[in-house]
Structures are given as C-alpha cells and as structure tokens.
Image: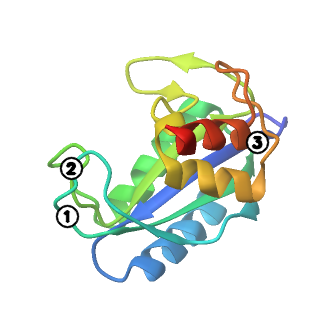
Amino acid sequence: MKSNINICFLGLGSNMGDLALNLSVACQHIEKWIGPITNSSSCIETKAWGIEAQNDFLNQVIVIETSYTAFEVLAKIQEIEHEMGRERIIKWGPRLIDIDILFFNDEIWEAPDLVVPHPYMAQRAFILNSLVEIAPNKIHPILHKSMKTLLEELTAQ
C-alpha cells in the first residue's frame, strides 16, 4: 500500500431487498476495507436506467480517501458486492448492491475492466444530482465541465 492519499468518488445503488440498509452496509464495508468516507450525498430514489422494467433504485454518491490504486479499489468494491450477495446475471438488471468508481483523483483510465471517469455519468441525472449536492464545481477531466454545468445541460435536453 502506498502512503499517498487518493480521492475517489463512488456511486452506490440498490433495488433489491432493504435498499437503505444495503447502502449503509456497503458504506460500512467501504470504510473498513478501502478508506474513510469524507463526504456523502443524500440517498435519492430513482427509476432504473438501462433496463427500465424493474424496481426503483436508491442511489447515493460518496467520497472516500484511500491509499489504494484505482485497480485495487475496483477489486475491493467487487469483493464487497460479492460478499453482500450481488450476482452479475443481466447487465443493468436488478441488483442488491452496485458500486461504481465515478472519479479517481482527476485520472483518466480506459482499461478492459476499468473506465474512469465513469462513462455514463454525464447521461445519468441521478449521479449528477448527487455530485452537484456534494461537489458542484468538480470538473470532469475529459469533458472539462463542472458537475453543475453537466446537470444543467442534461436537464435542458
């Protein structure tokens, strides 16, 4: 583990079981295994994205500090999802817990298993709403626009 601190924004979502409890348990695991949560948005209920014929989601964005790399964080969040009972059966299908890396510092990654910033973030109002709540002036490192501007543009469409 390196001693430098990385700032990582994570998107959490659940649409199966006790949604609030699922997000809470995920946050506890993240703090235990990855690093402290330094900021978190409100939990918001949203319609499913991708496959719409399923239960609504409860979503939240959190910010953590971690000494792990982006790939180590990815491995750890996948372990947490597995530990909590997530099964990857249908892409964008129902899930007990979903944890996505939205930002990792201001780094840009395009690897087979990891794309950062999250590739669909600017198309998802629920992510942008949560990001605007906690980091409205955060600049997207590829689009070079603030979260507030991205949300305004999406809402205007």
Mark 1 and mark 3 lie on one chain; the one further toward the N terminus is: 3
State how far apart marks 1 and 3 are (Cα): 33 Å
SS category of the residue bearing label 1: loop
Residue beneath the point at 47% across and 80% down: 20
Three-letter code for the amino acid on which mark 2 is drawn:
Ile
SS category of the residue bearing label 2: loop
Contact, mark 1 vs mark 2 (Cβ under 8 Å):
yes
Three-letter code for the amino acid on which mark 3 is drawn:
Ile
Q: Which residue is mark 1?
A: 54
Query: How is this picture coloured?
Result: rainbow
Per the rendering, the mark at residue 51 is 2
SS category of the residue bearing label 3: strand
- Count residues near mark 3 (Cα–Cα under 10 Å), then give few for <14, some for 14-19, many for 20+: some
65 on left or right of 62: right
Q: Residue 91: name its quadrant.
A: top left
Q: Is residue 144 above or below residue 151?
A: above
State how far apart marks 3 and 2 are (Cα): 31 Å
Residue 142 screen position, x and y as percent: 65, 18
Residue 51 screen position, x and y as percent: 21, 50
Per the rendering, the mark at residue 7 is 3
State how far apart marks 1 and 2 are (Cα): 7 Å
Taking depth in this image into account, of 18 and 147 the one nearest to the observer is 147
- Count residues near mark 1 (Cα–Cα under 10 Å), then give few for <14, some for 14-19, many for 20+: some
Residue 13 screen position, x and y as percent: 43, 61
